[in-house]
Image: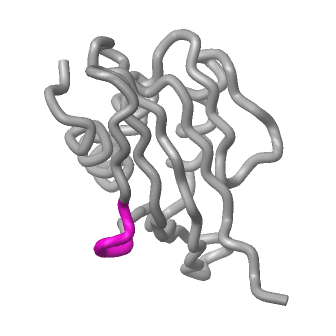
Amino acid sequence: MFEQPAQILDTWLEGVNSGALAKVASLYSQNALLLPTFSNRRLQTPKDIEAYFADLGSHEGLSVFLHPNMTVIQRLSESIHCLGGLYCWKFEIEKELLSFEARFTFLVDLAFNAPIIHHHSSQVPRSL
């Protein structure tokens, strides 16, 4: 169990950056909805979420980091919080290290062992 919502985000980041992607997938509740950065599908089953992270993990150099001072945590109830901000993904495609800026929101419930109930992430659009 997590005591603070920021601990969930820290655990998620550590899991992605260490390659512990099964651990990352286990943070999502059985009924979670993931609208991922690098897919046009909505993922609503543990199997789909695990497969998404396994696919991401197949890319060399996978990492993600938060932009400093860009994360906002909103308390919605005693145990439910919304976390939002910007992060940067990096990984290799065809031996080229690429970087993707993305915005994210997590809806988490501290009452759950698998606290992520909703996660939306999308690449930051380029300005017109």
> Is residue 85 located in the magenta-colored stretch of the structure?
no
Quarter of image, res 2 = top left
Residue 74, position as x, y percentages in the image: 37, 44
Q: How is the image coloured?
A: one colour
Instruction: Say whether residue 7 is left or right of residue 66.
Output: left
Indicate the quadrant containing the N terminus: top left, top right, bottom left or bottom right: top left
For the C terminus, the image quarter is: bottom right
Residue 10 image point, x, y percent: 25, 47
Residue 101 at x, y percent in the picture: 57, 73
Looking at the image, the residue that sits furthest to the left is: 3
Image coordinates of residue 63 in percent, x first then y, are: 41, 63
Residue nearest the observer in this picture, 3 or 34: 3
Please determine whether, in this image, residue 43 is positioned above or below residue 30.
Answer: below
Q: As rendered, which of 30 and 81 lies closer to the eye?
A: 81
Q: Is residue 35 left or right of residue 101?
A: right
Residue at 45% in and 28% down? 25
Count of numbered tags: 0
Residue at (37, 73) in percent of width and height: 67
- The question of residue 70 being in magenta is answered with yes
Q: In this rendering, is residue 59 above or below 115? A: below
> What secondary structure characterizes most of the magenta part?
loop
User: Residue 6 sits in which quadrant?
Assistant: top left
Figure check: 24 above or below 95: above
User: Is 64 placed above or below 127 here?
Assistant: above
At 66% from the left edge and 71% from the top edge, which residue is drawn? Answer: 124
Q: What range of the chain is rendered magenta?
A: 67-71
Q: Judge left or right: residue 50 versus residue 24.
A: right
Q: Nearer the viewer, residue 90 or 115?
A: 115
Q: Residue at x 59, y 78 (%)?
A: 98
